[in-house]
């Protein structure tokens, strides 16, 4: 079984938290000319109220031609090397990581109002951190309507409808509690807080 049972993560709250914190998805999609997948990177926003992902890509992106097909979305959280010194030399060298793997159906959006809503939603979400005194939050309405509409013609707006979620959180869950506690403390002292917070 892979990943091993103790590394599988089924908590939907933690899975959704990871895709929210690390929204850049590696998308694996079928390639009719090859046994290998086409791969592209796309930032996606998960809409928890509708349980869908939303995003947009350039018109020439292969995603634009696979409406109704399934793809795999891979979201990778923070990762780091695990030194045996983090666990009082009671482990072998390893690597800690967390990832979420989602199978989803591609649905291209053709409605112009819905395209505008998605662009507004994405902009509001990713611009929300630009609120400090020394930064400026960009507003979509700074672009004239005609220019916006022209830009939208160069893009494909997409909804991804998830059918399966899988989490692979390799965080030394197969180690005794005292070893995990030592690893967590060492990670915190090393400033690797995002990974340390996942270890309990």
Image: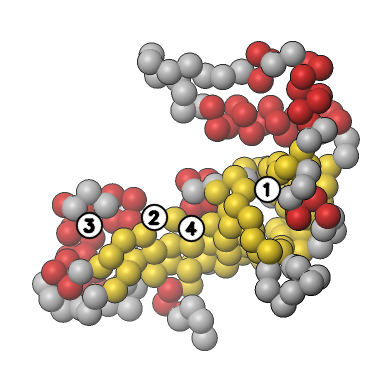
Query: Which residue position holds label 3?
Result: 187
Q: Secondary structure at mark 2?
A: strand
Q: Nearer the viewer, mark 2 or mark 1?
A: 2
Spatial CA span between label 3 and label 1? 32 Å
Task: Count neighbours of disc 2 (C-alpha within 10 A) and say few if under 14, some if 14 to 19, many if 20 or more.
Answer: some
Residue name at image x 43 percent, y 62 percent? 98
Query: Which residue position holds label 1?
Result: 53
- Considering every residue shown, the one lying at the far right of the view is 111
Q: Earlier in the sequence, mark 4 or mark 3?
A: 4
Query: Which residue position holds label 4?
Result: 76
Q: Earlier in the sequence, mark 3 or mark 1?
A: 1
Query: Which residue position holds label 2?
Result: 78
Q: Is residue 130 depicted above or below 200 in this figure?
A: above
Q: Earlier in the sequence, mark 2 or mark 1?
A: 1
Q: Earlier in the sequence, mark 3 or mark 2?
A: 2
Q: Nearer the viewer, residue 151 or 199?
A: 151
Spatial CA span between label 4 and label 3? 19 Å
Q: Is residue 79 depicted above or below 151 in this figure?
A: below
Q: Secondary structure at mark 3?
A: helix
Spatial CA span between label 2 and label 4? 7 Å
Return the x and y of residue 37 as percentages of the image width and height: 68, 69
Return the x and y of residue 17 as percentages of the image width and height: 50, 50
Q: Secondary structure at mark 1?
A: strand
Q: Nearer the viewer, mark 1 or mark 4?
A: 4
Q: Nearer the viewer, residue 98 or 182?
A: 98
Residue name at image x 34 percent, y 73 percent? 173
Q: Earlier in the sequence, mark 1 or mark 4?
A: 1
């Amino acid at each position: 079984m892979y990943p091993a049972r103790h590394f599988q993560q089924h908590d939907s709250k933690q899975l959704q938290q990871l895709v929210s914190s690390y929204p850049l998805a590696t998308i694996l999609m079928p390639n009719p000319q090859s046994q290998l997948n086409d791969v592209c990177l796309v930032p996606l926003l998960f809409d928890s109220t509708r349980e869908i992902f939303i995003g947009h890509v350039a018109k020439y992106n292969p995603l634009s031609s696979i409406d109704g097909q399934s793809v795999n979305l891979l979201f990778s959280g923070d990762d780091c090397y695990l030194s045996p010194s983090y666990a009082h030399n009671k482990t072998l060298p390893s690597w800690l990581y967390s990832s979420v793997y989602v199978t989803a159906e591609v649905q291209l959006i053709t409605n112009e109002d819905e395209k505008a809503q998605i662009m507004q939603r994405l902009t509001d979400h990713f611009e929300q951190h630009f609120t400090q005194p020394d930064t400026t939050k960009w507003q979509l309405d700074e672009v004239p309507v005609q220019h916006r509409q022209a830009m939208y013609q160069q893009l494909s707006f997409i909804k991804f409808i998830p059918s399966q979620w899988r989490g692979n959180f390799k965080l030394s869950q197969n180690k005794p509690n005292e070893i995990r506690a030592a690893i967590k403390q060492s990670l915190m002292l090393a400033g690797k807080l995002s990974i340390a917070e996942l270890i309990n």
